[in-house]
Amino acid sequence: MHQPISATLRDQTLELLASGAATNRGDLVEALQVAPSTVTAVVRRLIEEGVLEEEGVGRSTGGRRPRILRLRDTDGVLAVAELGGRHARVGLCGPGGALRVSEEVPIEIGAGPKHIFDVVSETFDRLRESVAPGQPLLGAGVALPGPVEFPSGRIVGAARMPGWSSGDPAKILANSFGGLIAPVIVDNDAKAAALGEFATRDDEPGDMIYVKAGTGIGACLVTDGQIFRGGRGLSGDVTHVRVADSGERRCSCGGRGCLETVASGAALARQLAEQGAPDMSLNDIMVAVNDGDPAVVTAVRQAGRLLGVALSGLVNFLNPRAVVVGGALSSLDVYVAATRGMLYERCLPSMTQSLTIEASVAGPDAALVGLGRLLRSTVSS
């Protein structure tokens, strides 16, 4: 039997070869900073799987001329999509999992899975026709803004997704692609985005708490390059963590004082409306902050502070190397800075001494990148 290969090491090897940063085993040893025997084991396994092939020899630097490694030319594309309350971000990945193109289209999450997955399928077909005409579909993945059992893909108690709790989303997704037999993945949006964020970073952040702060709030722990999923795949639900100074507002889950009610984009829109501001979308709030509107800036700063309160216990307990804030609100410096300030205030000095707290570098395509990585592993296994 083969010894298991670290998913992180596998991904890094494929990325180095795909980008041209490495072309042979020696390059991989130098770039990965691991033993030659480790690189040999990884390369041998990938060759056996049909992912890599050796061809020709490179220039000698004093010893035996190195064999050139390259990814096998494989026809096909992967369909990926992240759903929000009122938009879907749809993308096309190559067979290696790299995102090639993405597009945002309007949806209403309450329309239910069949209608929305049909929209996703139609958008993907249009993207494929313009970028990779005639290429076969190798797999499809969707990230949802609610708790998702993994790997079954079933939704559990999604208060913000009416009409989604019954049925089998993975089966409906496959049917939307014409009865797709290839691998289909349905995952939580924060988990997919966390994986995409981890993969995008040049310097591996170690154990990382990723928070997706947009209309709602989700989170995920990445440890040793892997998503920590918990017993049913439902880990990371900071949305319903009870927060002091929340005002005991009623939450969509039926409880009171949840983080969602004070630190999310939806909460900010409601709070500003209560203060007499006109109805504001999340985009309107972001524009107002960038314009320096004092009332909106104050509200956003307080929301960031309350996110920091909710995360402080996790940081003290888990001792991560990084806390990364993604989602739409991560583009607002005042929100991220307020979260950072509260973490420094509430956490033990020993926990923040080497802690990185910053906004996402993967941006709005983070979940699509993460789904591409998940599908690549599934398709090539």
Image: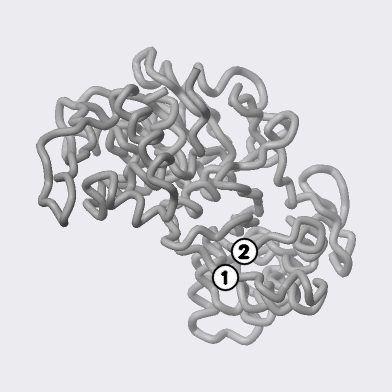
Q: Image quarter for residue 261? A: bottom right
Query: Where's the C terminus, which quadrant?
Result: top left
In front: label 2 or label 1:
2
- Within-10-Å neighbours for mark 2: few <14, some 14–19, many 20+: many
- Within-10-Å neighbours for mark 1: few <14, some 14–19, many 20+: some
Looking at the image, which is closer to me, 172 or 10?
Answer: 10
Q: Image quarter for residue 178? A: top left
Instruction: Point out residue 243 in the picture as x, y percentages from the top left corner.
Output: 85, 61
Report the residue marked by disc 2. Answer: 322
Marks 2 and 1 close (CB-CB < 8 Å): yes
The CA distance from mark 2 to mark 1 is 8 Å
Report the residue marked by disc 1. Answer: 358
Task: Name the residue at 17% across, 35% down.
Answer: 132
Task: Name the residue at 48% across, 22% down.
Answer: 2
Please state which amino acid type lies under the numbered disc 2: Ala
| N-term mark: 2 or 1 | 2
Left or right of 331 on screen, residue 74: left
Mark 1 element type: strand
